[in-house]
Image (tube, grey):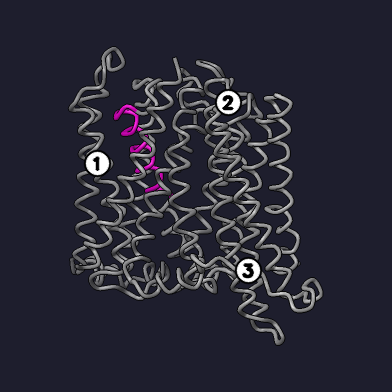
Amino acid sequence: MGLATTVSIVVICVMVVVGAIGYVIDRHASKLEP
Amino acid sequence: MNAPHLHLILNHVPTIGSAIALGLLLLGLLRRQEALTRVSLEVFYVIALITLPAYLSGVATGMELEQMPDVSVEAIQKHHDGALVGFVLMLLTGLTSWLGLWQWRRVNRPSGINIGIVLVLSLLTLTTMAGTATMGGEIRHPEMMPEGSAPTAGPTWIHAASIQSLVTDNTWIWPSLEALHFVGLWLLFGVVLLVNLRMLGMMKSVPFSALHRLLPWAVLGLGINVLSGMMWVIATPEQYMSNVSFFWKMGFLLLAGLNLLYVTAFDEAWQVGANEDASFGNKAIAFGALASWVCVMYFGRMLPFLGNAF
Amino acid sequence: MDFIIQLQHSAVMDWVRESGSLLGYPAILFLHTIGLATVAGLNGAIDLRLLGVASRIPLAPLTRFFPFIWAAFGVTALSGVTLLIADAETKLRSPVFYIKLVFIILALINLQLLKKRVFADPDVDAHPVTGQARMLALSSLVFWVAATTAGRLMAYIGPVAGLGG
C-alpha cells in the first residue's frame, strides 16, 4: 500500500474514533442538562 | 539551571504532589466537603500539566547521564520506562479530572463515577510513580540499596526503546502523526477562538455557558497533539531536547493549559451571560490565552529553524 | 507556469528562500499555519454545531465569523502562493499539491453553500437543522481533514525540495 493510502486510512480511523468520543460526551451532557 | 537540576526539582510534583492531591480528594470525600473535592480535581489537573516538563527534563537528563562513566544505561532506561507509564497514567488522571470539572461546572453537582475513576487512576499513578522514583534513585544512589538486594524491576510490557524502534522502522507512522497533529491543532484552535473571541466581545448575545459546551472538542484536539508529540519525542529525543524552540513551545503550552482550567471551572468565566460584556480581567485573560496558543503554534513551526530539529 | 518559475528566481523569492532570516520562509510558513488553523478551526467548529454539538449555541450569531474566516483565508492563500512561488519547480510537479488544492476549493465551495443555503435563512434557529445542512457540515469536515493530510504529505510524496518544514 502506498504511503498516501496508509496515512489516509490512519487519519480516517483516528478521526472517526475522536469524533465518536466527542459525540458521546456531548450526548451525555445533553442528557444531564435540562 | 540545567536539565538535571530542573528534573530533580520537578520530579517532586508527580510523586509528592499526586500523594497530596489524592489526600485532598479522600479528605474531601470523607468530610463530605464538595469544595475540597472539587479543588482536588483541579490540583490533579495542574499536577498532570507539570508532569509534562518533569518527563521531558528527565529525557534530557537521561541523554546527558548516559554519556557519563560509572552510570548504568540499563538503570536509566528502566527508570525512563517506568516514567513513561507513570506519565501516561498521570495524563489520564488529569484528563478525567478535567472532564469531571467540566461536567461539575455545567450541572452543579459532582459525578460519582468520575470521582471513582479519578480515585482508581490516581492510585495507579501514585504506585507507578513510587516505583519509578525508586528506580530513579537507584541510578546514582547505591547507598539506598542494602547489601545483596536486587534493583527494582521495571515495567515489562512497555519500553520507550520499543516505541522508538516502532516509529523509526515503520515509515508511515511519522507522516501520519504529522497529519493528525495538524488536524488536532485546528480542532483545538477553532474552539479556542470561539471561546476567547466571545470574551473579547464577539457574539455577545451568546452566553459563555453555551460555548463552554464545546470545550471537550478542544481537549480532544489537544489530546491528539500531546500523544503525537510524545511519539515524536520518544522516537527522536535529540531533535527536541536541545532545541530552544521546543522549550518555549512547552512553556506556552503550560500557560495555555492553565487558561483551559480557568475557562472550564472558574466562576468569573462561567458567569458571563447573554448580552453581557466580559470584565477587563476576563478580556485580558482571553487575549493572553489566544497569544499563548499562537505562540505554541509559532514555536512549533519554528522547530526546524530556531532549533536543530530535522 | 513559466512565469511562476521566473518569479521563483526573482530577487525577492531568493531572499525568502535562502536568506535564513526568520522573517523569510519561516515567517511565511507560520502565517500559513495560523491562517489554516483559523479557517479550518472556525469552519470546523461551525460544522460541529450544525451536526448537533453544543446545540444551545444559536446559529444566527455564527455568521459574524464568516468575514473572519475569509480574512484568515486571505492570509493563508497569500502565504500559500508565496510558498508555491518560492519552490515552484518542485511543487507544480507534485500531484499531492494539486490534490490539496482540490480539497481546499471543495471546502470553500462547501462553506459558501452553507452560507447561502443555511445561514441566509433569518429563521435558521426557529427549526431543527436540516438534513442538507448536516450533510454539508460533514462534508466540510471531511474536506478540511483531507486538505490537511494532503498538505502534510507534500513533504513525503512526489518531488520534494530541500526546503525545511
Work out whether B251 lies above or below B42. below
Is disc 1 in the same subunit as disc 3? Answer: no
Task: Measuring from the top left, give residue B47's x and y in whole percent.
Answer: 66, 47
**Residue identified by numbered label 2:** B110
Q: CA distance from mark 1 to mark 3?
A: 50 Å
Q: Is residue A11 left or right of residue B84?
A: left
Residue density around tag 2, few if under 14, some if 14–19, many if 20 or more, within 10 Å: some
The residue stretch that appears in magenta: C34-52
Is disc 3 in the same subunit as disc 2? Answer: yes
Foreground pick, B210 / B51: B51
Q: Residue at x 72, y 86 (%)?
A: B70
Q: Which mark is residue B289?
A: none
Task: Measuring from the top left, give residue C58's x and y in whole percent.
Answer: 37, 20
Marks 1, 2: nearer the viewer: 2
Q: CA distance from mark 1 to mark 2?
A: 42 Å
Marks 1, 3: nearer the viewer: 3
Q: Residue at x 29, y 30 (%)?
A: C51
Q: Residue furthest right?
A: B143
Q: Amino acid at mark 1?
A: Leu
Residue density around tag 3, few if under 14, some if 14–19, many if 20 or more, within 10 Å: many
Work out whether A21 lies above or below C87. above
Foreground pick, C20 / C35: C35
Residue density around tag 1, few if under 14, some if 14–19, many if 20 or more, within 10 Å: some
Q: Amino acid at mark 3?
A: His
* Mark nearer the N terminus (3 vs 2): 3
Q: Residue furthest front?
A: B148
Q: Residue at x 34, y 20 (%)?
A: C60
Q: Residue at x 41, y 59 (%)?
A: C29
**Residue identified by numbered label 3:** B79
Q: Which mark is residue C108?
A: 1
**Is B303 in the magenta?**
no
